[in-house]
Amino acid sequence: MNRQPAGRALDDYGVANLSPLALRPNHKHDEYSLDRTMNGIVQDEIRYDETSGATPTLRSPQVDLKDPIQVHLLTETALLDSQGFEILSQEEVDELKKQAELLSQRVESTRSNLAIQCKYRDAAASMARLGQGGGADDNESQESERERIECERKCDELASELLELEKRLLIPHRKIVEHTAAILQLTHKASKKKASQQNGQSLSGIPGSPESLYTYSHGRNSLDQMGDETYFDDSSGYQLDGMERARKNAIEIPLKSPIREQNQIRVELDRLREENTQLRGQTDGLLQKLQGFNTSLRETIVRFNPEVNDGYDEPPEISSIPDTKLEDLLKSQTEYLESGLVAVQAEQEYFAGGNQIGERIETINLQLRDLLMMSDPHYTPTTIPSESDVNGQMAYLEKSIRSVDSQLARANSSSSGANSETGPVLTGLWESIQRGFSEAKKRKDDHRRARAEKGLPEDDDDASDDEGFDTAEPYSLEAFADRVQWMHAQSLTLRDQKYVLKRQIKQQRELNNKSDAEKDEELARKQEDLEQSQEMLSRAEQSATDAQRMLSDAMKELEDARTAAADTVDAAEASVQKREDRIIELEEALAAAQDSLASAERDLSAARSGTSGTEEKIADMTAQMTAVAQARKAADERIKELETELAQVTAQMTAVAQTKKAADERVKELETELAQVTAQVTALTKERKTADGTTKELEKKLLDMTAQVEAVTQEKKTAHETSKKLEKELAENSTQVAAVAKERKKTDENTKKLEKKVADMTAQVAALTQQTKTADETTKELKKELAAKTKQFRVKDDEVDQLNMTIAELKTEVTIARAELDGAYGSRAERAAEVAAIKQSSESLKLQNQVDRLKKELSATVEELEGVTRETIGSEKEKADVEAKLDEALAARTSLETELQKARDKMAKLQEELDGERLKIRTDGARPGAGASMLSERFRATMREERKKFQEDLREERTRCRKLEEELSRLKRSQGPGKSPLSPR
């Protein structure tokens, strides 16, 4: 493979001699295509079936599509070979097609570049041969040889790149073709023949005669027989001309083939075994997942109530019952899952009334206290714990129940004479209980009316089980016993709910602590990424400054070289013109002298050949010969002088040529430096563009965070105003305790909203961090400027969280204090009667001091929030400064691009002027190699035109790519970071 033709160098891509076709601009070299054909990359020549109608069918000349046996064998082989091919999704197929299209475009572009470089290489090789054969200067020969070597190197690089691209292009093409073959193999359907009517076909669906050519099923994983209506029904399949006529032939079906039937059975058995293995593996995986789900469900049920549910049944093990059927295993796992879900639902319903525990316990305790005070005049009531102290409430309730039990025991142990006194006592207890229920119901009605007046919706927490009791029901022993039993059951239920609530509160606190730690860690990572990006952006700006300085230096040196070259060329041209005029005059004088000498020689010959002459004529001839000899001697001396002058002029021209060569080398160096600077400027422009996009995104995130901070500040102000209202209502009327509790709930909801917003901000910060990582080499300085702001916002967030916690604690203390007041002074009427007596007591003073302290802390909180607002305004000003800096950077980038374009224009103009000056130098037409020099100059002019055209095409291609990149970036920004515009819809 890749054998090199004889008479050609190993690194030669073209023909040995330059053919006329190679000099044409539209001629494309076929040497590399020959090499690609040897490597097996180029496809074979497309062959069509001329008899297939309007739509030609690709086929080999050895294929006879009219032979049903051959077509059937090919179909069977294709279906068998395509069983292992992978079937892709529509999105994957679209992605492969896009990839193949992009690679095809790159292949075409590289191929055109290779054709152009092959032309350059062949022309350079021709110039090198002309220079060697024409006796040109060594410098020109070496330059031509260098150009030839450089062109060959470029051709080698482009050939390697083209080969690699074509190999890469084969991968998506192969995957698409395999996907297409797999789809066709899966959907292929053979005609269905009745087993009982056709040549004794067996019941298993496998034919017993050569008619199997038309009854095999080619489904991938199915034994179903397909219908006749879909056999080769697709227009893109084989177009079998004359198939119907061939089927009517009496000898169309060959003899039975037992080997084929055995192979068919073996293939079906292997396929069924493979399907069984796959299904077994999937079922085992499903069982494992179900067992894992059941284990997790049991752990959840146990966590609901560890004391009660600790003995909950374990999920059935798979390994412990190997002889059980698969359906029994699945049934046992699903039944366990259903029972677990029912248990979880029951636990959730059981704990749904947890919000009413405190209020119910307080109501029951009030009723029991009134009952005991009415039944026992010597009973001294103790302070009822606060609503939040569930343990204290339960202990008070148990103590009251024990007191009731002791009184009932004393009542039962009394004599029959005392039984007459039991009736009034029980009646008094009954009235006390009824009165307690009435007061509780009245408080709830007042609370509902207050909410209705404020326009708030009805609170579902106000509903309780004691609303079903009739407060006007007369006393009876049965009713009294039922009421006491209900109170006892409520106490037990509330105690269980208290335990569950304590456990849930503990779990919630652990989760909150964990989320705070994760948030701090995420903010620390974000700070580090911002600092790194700022450093990289600073380095990029420094590189842009250095590149601009290098560009200005290169332009200055180029201008100096241009001026010096222009002066030298002008002086050399003037000197050469003078010497050429002098040479022309001397050549004319020499020609005249030679003419005179020739005429004299002719006269002398005529005189010698004459038969008669005189001595005078001889003397005249002698004098003339002497004069001619002197003239010739003078002419020879003059010729020597002219040759000396010509040598001097040649030396001067050589010096001028060397000077021009040095100037050309300097120009090439400057072009190289300019190309490097251009590449650096392009890279910096791209980096700046990426930095601009990232900066806009960061500014948008900063605005969102600022708006969120303002919303938090507004909510804190609202909470502060609400706290003031609550304090006023506490001083005016103690009946607003329920409203305070509701306000506390609203504050808790606000706190939850704030926590949700903080979580959203954390998610946004995470997304921002992910985007920042992609631009970690371009956004350093911007992130350094935003680092301080992010740090300030983090500090403010911490302060806001701390303030939230402080406010929650303060409100909790206020609620506890109010609950303690209610428990210490009984019902509303009793509190109203006792308020005047305890205003000057120590407890009242302590409560007032606590209220004052809360007011001071709330005032301090408001001041801190005002400070946060002021700092936010300062951050907005700093953001405006950053935007101004970004605008300046954009203006600097625009000016840099303008200067770069000017430098390119100057470079092109300088190149044209240098080429023009190079072409102005005249050479002696009589010296050897003049034709080669003229051909070399013409070739260089042609090469300049081709190079200029190639550079223009390359510039247009870069401009088009830049526009496409900008459009792609704009589409990405418009659609957001979650979705790519190239993803299939």
Image (cartoon, rainbow, N blue to C red):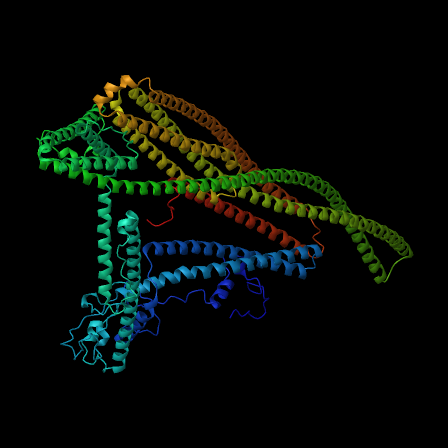
Task: Give the quadrant of residue 287.
Answer: bottom left
Nearest to the observer: residue 668 or residue 887: 887
> In this image, 627 relative to 685: left or right?
right
Q: Nearer the viewer, residue 887 or 900?
A: 887
Does 110 sit left or right of 906 as displayed? Answer: left
Where in the figure is residue 260, as x and y percent of width and height?
A: 27, 79
Asked if residue 168 shows in the view, the reply is yes
Residue beneath the point at 46% across and 54% down: 106
From what the image shows, is residue 170 above or below residue 678?
Answer: below
Rendering quarter of residue 71: bottom left
Q: Report x, y in % for residue 86.
A: 34, 63
- Residue 62: image quadrant is bottom left
Residue at screen point 73% across, 43% down: 572
Is residue 55 visible in the rendered structure shown here?
no
Measuring from the top left, give residue 924's x and y in whole percent. 71, 51
Please, is residue 305 above or below residue 788 in the view? below
Q: Is residue 218 left or right of residue 45?
A: left
Please count the marks in the image. Answer: 0
**For this rendering, which residue is in front, 680 or 268?**
268
Of the pair 222 and 508, the residue shown nearer to us: 508
805 above or below 194? above
The spot of residue 390 in percent (x, y) is: 29, 36
